[in-house]
Image: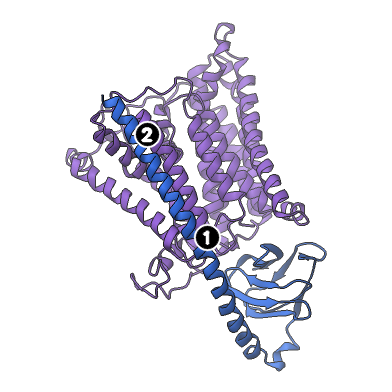
Chain colours: A purple, B blue
Amino acid sequence: MWPLAHGIGGRSDLPVPLWLAQYGGAAALVVSFVVLVAFWQLPRFDDPDGGRPLPVRLQRVVDAPGTRLLLRLIGLAMGAAIVVVAVLGPPSPGANPAPTWLYVWFWVGLVPASLLLGPVWRALNPLRTLTMVISRFAGDRDAELARPLPPGLGYWPAVAGLLAFVWLELVYRDAALPITVAWFLLAYGAVNLFAGALYGPKWHDRCDAFEVYSTLIGHLAPFGRRSDGRLVLRNPLRGLSSIDQAPGLVAVVCTLLGSTAFDGLTRTQLWTRLTLTTGPLANALIGTAGLLAMVALIYGVYTAAVRASSRYLPRSQRQHREQLEARFVVSLLPIAVGYTTAHYFSLFLFQGQAGYILASDPFAAGWNLFGTADWRIAYTLISTATIALVQVAAIVTGHVLGVVVAHDRAVGIFSGKAKTDAQYPLLVVMVTYTTIGIALLVGA
Amino acid sequence: MPALRRWAAVAVLTAVAALTVAACGDNGSSQATGTTTTSTSATTSTTVAATTTAKPATTADTTPVIQIRVVGGKPQGGVRRERVKLGEAVVLRVVADVADEVHVHSYDRKADVAPGKPAEIRFTADIPGVFEVELEQRRQKLLELEVR
């Protein structure tokens, strides 16, 4: 079941064949142990300054003030377009492109865009742009007089923002209505603009949920910046070592993983049976509880594993468990991206088409702006076998990269025999996540 | 002084947001009611046309019919999953004790249903995947159609 089914994305994928799932799971297991006893005993990906510099000319274009301004204007135009269409367009999600733009183009599309190019939303984010404009109007261009962020705040506002969004998307039954999209965007925009006005543009670094999401995934991009600002082509795993660690980082990653797992859970027939006889309010409560439980489960299992690993630290360092959690959590990021790809790849491909089909006549006024108004979604773009293969491949690849990153972290933190031993708890966690992920695909 | 202007900016934002929300709330509700009525009337007319034309008595005997009985707005016996071969003809028959609209997602087939007036939807299952059949107004899932 796709919870946005009411007019948007009423198709879901066929269950993945059992044999394919078994091969995928077995491959994941084998690779895990190969990595464990592996080749390298010294960290390879912990140097954020590696990589091959890109041509200076390219860098000049990318960093040119004109380019930056253009990106900001594009972002503002995108933001304005979706709000205007959501408010003034037709009220049905089957006729109004705004829900597809938000849930499919933006939310799902942010993943491949960031994975390929880096923190794209930082450059486009219209809320950041408006915050910058506000600072300038306040006569405080460099935001020197903005308040400092409270030290313990870290990523927590982003966690709240992400939870609010995934709740809306996956639990709220009117999620797909354009009016819901309008309310959400206005509320989200208002909160972030207020905070931005008080704290300056730095608010958006760690507290603006969508920018945090894009920036985190952007660390896995093949393009990155060295600490001196130079653009480089690099091993994507290297980027993970430069993630800005702050309180709440673990919660951000666990929210992403947990919400995707919850989405998988709601597509199972078990869930359908559970929510059959209950009313809308009860369903909302069950959904909320389910979503929070999935996030808590992912979080609990992860922190328990890190606690177990921390026993391999010398006694004097054990109080740094929270740091350890934050250092290892980046290894869950490839897993989260794998989960997301497996769940939303076909939605992006199919329902994504509605984004430009409906864009031709966003106000139901009989227009045909782009000549696409009478197109229909081509559901045969790729075969169901390809979809199943991509799903399993995404989860297994995410798992393998996660294990590799965790190994690399472990050999940098622990010493001697503990290098291997300390990896077991996290390895168990990853195998568990992957098994759950694959099981949800089979049970779909 | 600039700190003061920062607060001024916040105040201005509050005012703007309050106004937008007020304006948007009005707009949304009036629009929503306006179009619901038009869309229901539009679908009624189209479904009437669809059911009358798409009923050649010759094929009706050979295609198996998927029956769904709705009691109290819920599908009797729970939400089943029906498997259908790609390319096969499908006939859905919904008997309900409530008035609503039956919707086959993605195939985008709709038909009105009411007590004593069963809905019948016929189409060729030419898109692979899992699709929901729903009571549109109640957002109640009736059936999962697995086409492969």
**Residue lying at 25% horizontally and 32% vertically, measured from the top left:** A230
Q: Quadrant of residue A267?
A: bottom right
Q: Amino acid at mark 1?
A: Ser
Q: Residue at x 32, y 35 (%)?
A: B9
A2 relative to B44, above or below: above
Q: Which residue is mark 2?
A: A196
Determine contact: label 1, label 2, CB under 8 Å.
no
Disc 2: CA contacts within 10 A as few (<14), some (14-19) or many (>=20): many
Residue that label 1 marks = B29
Quadrant of res A141: top left
Instruction: Please tell me which residue lies in front, A159 or A253.
Output: A159
Nearest the eye: A126 or A109: A126
The location of residue A65, given as percent across then percent down, is: 19, 40
Disc 1 vs disc 2: which is toward the camera?
A: 1
SS for tag 1?
helix
Q: Is residue A347 above or below residue A162?
A: below
- What x and y, as percent, mark residue A18? 68, 54
Give the quarter of the figure containing the N terminus of chain B. Answer: top left
